[in-house]
Amino acid sequence: MSESPTPENASFDQIGEVLRNHQSFVLISHVRPDGDAIGSQIALGFALMAAGKSVRLINEDGLPDNLEFMAGSDKIELPPAEPLDVEVAIALDTAAKPRMGEKALHAASKAKIWLNIDHHKSNPSYGDLNLIDSSSPATGQILYQLITALGLPMPAESRDAIYVAVSTDTGSFQYPSTTAATYRMAAELIDHGLDVGKINSDTYDNHPYRRVELMRALLNTLELSADGLVANWELRDKTRIDLALLPEDSEGLIDIIRAIRGVQLAVFFEELVDGKIRVSMRSKDKRVDVCKIALEFGGGGHSLAAGIRMTGPLEDAKALVLAAIRRHIEAAGL
Ligand code: AMP
Ligand code: MN
Ligand code: MN
């Protein structure tokens, strides 16, 4: 991790003042958005709209097909060509400013104030006001606390979006980042009318057939290191084209190899349309911090879940990343 001192977090009151004293907002999340990214945009966006504010929700890659079920998701737009006339831009769940994408940043370029609300420990606090809580399992949980503390409205769209954000970022309330506060929050959302059976079924039992075909293809590339500590698999252009895959189809599949007994590090290599290689990493052992490994290659994330976008070809990226993982495993004495 970079050792540069990070500016202090703003208080909820300071954030509240900016929200109260302005009328127009653009909310942005990261490229290839996941449930926490889109969920955070809907959660804060609808709370602000219910408070009478004018709000735009922008994502570089638009709304992924697997999150179309979310109430309010039709408000997610691709970046307009011209910068928006907004006073405040709010980055949500975005570990580094460039992760919002060039077009989204251009759309927000007229904003006078940037808020940065996130839970990635690699976040360098690039906002004018920052609210980074790396102990929080999801940006959605920070927003729940913020909305509640400020007494902002919590419409049904926000309520449901917060649940999806936290559920997807905690692997259904399973990862060690899940705390008692997370379960209390979920209970309170249910008290406020959330339909837990329906939302879980919409989130997890609703996959397109091609995603299961992708699992089959990935299993054919599975590799396990001789000591059984590292499992990896890969997705090539050919499979993406043959199965007509969308970027979101691979979301979460790394959990299948992460779950192998004895495996401490799971790695997913993917050839992207732009020729770059996406690397997803998961650790099951606190002594091997995948965020540190990701930072060596310009990526970032959390101790137990991190990612990289790096130059190809895939063979080179794989050799470099697997060698770095090996170094970290040895340094940790596993
Ligand atoms: P993923 O493996 O894509 O699910 O990402 C795991 C975690 O690392 C998520 O919290 C991502 O936001 C973060 N992450 C993924 N790729 C990058 C990247 N290139 N730079 C910074 N953070 C990333
Ligand atoms: Mn995310
Ligand atoms: Mn997140």
Image (cartoon, rainbow, N blue to C red):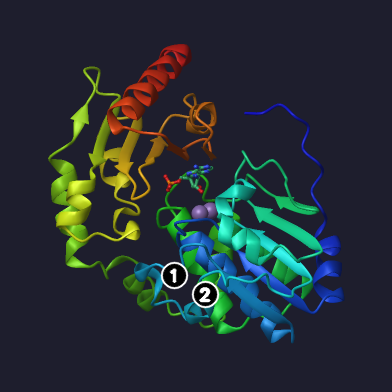
Where's residue 197, x and y in %?
A: 36, 75
**Does residue 85 appear in this view?**
yes
Residue linked to disc 2: 76
Which numbered tag is attached to residue 141? none
Residue linked to disc 1: 63
Task: Report the side of 96 relative to 12 (left or right).
Answer: left
Residue at coordinates 45% horizontally, 47% vertically from top-left? 175
Pick the quarter of the image with the C terminus. top left
Residue at coordinates 34% horizontally, 59% vertically from top-left? 248
Task: Report the side of 252 relative to 226 (left or right).
Answer: right
Pick the quarter of the image with the N terminus. top right
Where's residue 191, x and y in %?
A: 55, 78
Type of amino acid at the residue the image marks with label 1:
Leu
Where's residue 277, x and y in %?
A: 37, 39
Q: Secondary structure at mark 1?
A: loop
Residue 292 to residue 176: above or below: above
Where's residue 100, x and y in %?
A: 57, 55
Q: Neighbour class for label 2 at 10 Å: few (<14), some, many (≥20)? A: many
Viewer-proximal residue among 79 and 207: 79
Residue 130 to residue 326: above or below: below
Viewer-proximal residue among 170 and 5: 5
Q: Earlier in the sequence, mark 1 or mark 2?
A: 1
The CB of the residue at mark 1 lies under 8 Å from ligand 2: no
Type of amino acid at the residue the image marks with label 2:
Ile
**Does residue 191 appear in this view?**
no
The CB of the residue at mark 2 lies under 8 Å from ligand 2: no
Residue at coordinates 34% horizontally, 52% vertically from top-left? 252
**Are the residues tagged 1 and 2 within 8 Å (C-beta)?**
yes
Q: Secondary structure at mark 2?
A: strand
Q: Say which quarter of the image contains residue 50.
A: bottom right
Viewer-proximal residue among 259 and 331: 331
